[in-house]
Amino acid sequence: MRNLLLGSRHATPGNGIVQVSAVIEIIEAVNSRINALVWGAPMLVMLVGTGLLLTIVTRGIQFRKLPFAFREVLGKLFRPTEGEGTVRPFQALATALASTVGVGNIAGVSTAVFAGGPGAIFWLIVSGLLGMATKFAEIAIALHYREPDATGTMRGGAMYVLKKGLGLGWLGAIFALLTGVAGFGLGNMVQANSVADALRASFGVPPWISGLCLAGLTALVVLGGIRRIAEVTQFLVPFMCLIYLGAALFILIRFAGHLPEVFGMILADAFTPQAAIGGFAGSTVKAAIINGFKRGLFSNEAGLGSAPMVHATAVTDHPVRQAAYGIFEVFVDSLVVCALTGFTVLATGAWTSGENGAAMSARAFAIGLPGEWGHLTVTVCVIAFAFSTLIGWAYYGETAVVYLMGARAAFPYRLLWTASVYVGAIGSLHLVWDIADTLNGLMAIPNLIGVLGSIGLLLRLIHEFFKPGGVEERARAK
């Protein structure tokens, strides 16, 4: 092994390249095995099972309080809020959505259909319904244990829950380390590369130019910290969602005659095998369930512990009030954006084209929109979704680093984050991205331990907030 890693004294440059390639292949093989376990059936059972358990113990909080969540988000967009915090509640929501509503909403849903058939959309929606309870719980718990750092910025997340709530500071440090490292892959370089690829394919822009411009824009936002990020995302996220949803709704209206068949396929194929049609190779019920759950959970990030870190910055009078924004967040991501993507690729017939991922979504929009509008819409949305994820994940990584190293580490981290954007735009770092995907999945383990270990606290917070004469009733009386 030592010779394999370092080479012999007489090794030629060619032999050195071969040896490096061999090491990379070994790392790829090991990571592939670990990734299969991390994102395999046991993890899906943990995530889905947690959502189901939380739904039961909270008596379906995501269904009972969905109207309350809508009133909180839409009814208080521009109203001042009371309590401690760093940014307004909607700004925290927008920043969280910036990270969750990403390229995966375009490519991931189509991948689920490609591998699991139309029935995968049904299970994706189910994962979203359960994920609403998980996201509500992890946000409420994170806000209870949040604290200001040395600069006064409010910080929170699974690491603080594990340390302050369960006395597992070492596990909190592991979660923070996983978050900090994974962010550079999935939240940074993957997104930068997606933007560079989209600009090169659509407009012929060289990646190095895209990288410089994107790094510059990122610096303008990220170097200003959470307040600057929140100010940008509160306008960027509604803008990009409206463009994408407007285009998808136009297509569905145009293909309205196919919708009864689409809904019928989704319901039927969720419980029965799907035969090969056109370029679609067919699928089993197991494939529909696994791919639907996997892509849904990967998209809305419920249970991974990412969004609570930014929701913990919100100005609010009680943890449950901001947790309601988490219900709305997953609703928008899974039950609106992801579901409409799935309906679009099915209604237009793009799912039988043999294309996969973003190519399938692009074909659906090209079929459904006139002229070049379909191609242009997908290109613009890929760029906007990727950039929003890039700046949203910057704060997740920063929070992790601040937990590990203190507030002084925040600004150097922002500089490193900006530089990595350029590297991601010009590079082809698939191994880095694959490892980051594994680390991202591993974040769920300590986060779920924190959530499950705090169920008693969660129930007390819910009762305290909604009981007669409780926090919400007193707030309405003012």
Image (tube, rainbow, N blue to C red):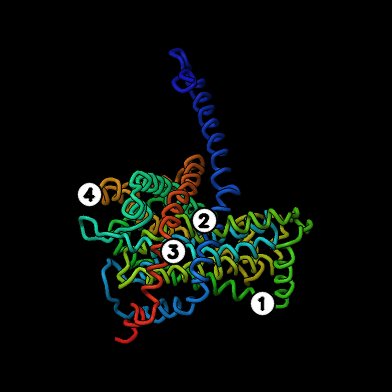
Secondary-structure class at tag 4: helix
Quadrant for residue 471, please give it. bottom left
Residue 348 position (above or below residue 19): below
In primary-sequence order, the first of circles 1 and 2 is 2
Secondary-structure class at tag 3: helix
Quadrant location of the C terminus in the rendered image: bottom left
Q: What residue is pinned by disc 2?
A: 198
Which callout, 2 or 4, points to the residue nearer the camera?
4
Q: Amino acid at mark 3?
A: Ala
Give percent across and percent down for residue 309.
36, 58
Q: What residue is pinned by disc 4?
A: 408
- Comparing 313 with 339, the one in front is 313
Q: How far apart are labels 1 and 3 at the CA level?
A: 39 Å
In primary-sequence order, the first of circles 3 and 2 is 3
| Residue 107 horizontal side relative to residue 355, left or right | left
Circles 1 and 2: CB distance less than 8 Å?
A: no
Quadrant for residue 274, please give it. bottom right
Q: How far apart are labels 3 and 2 at the CA level?
A: 37 Å
Question: Which label is found at residue 137?
Answer: 3
Q: What residue is pinned by disc 1?
A: 254
In primary-sequence order, the first of circles 1 and 3 is 3
Q: Amino acid at mark 2?
A: Ala
Which callout, 3 or 2, points to the residue nearer the camera?
3
Residue 394 position (above or below residue 322): above
In primary-sequence order, the first of circles 2 and 4 is 2
In primary-sequence order, the first of circles 3 and 4 is 3
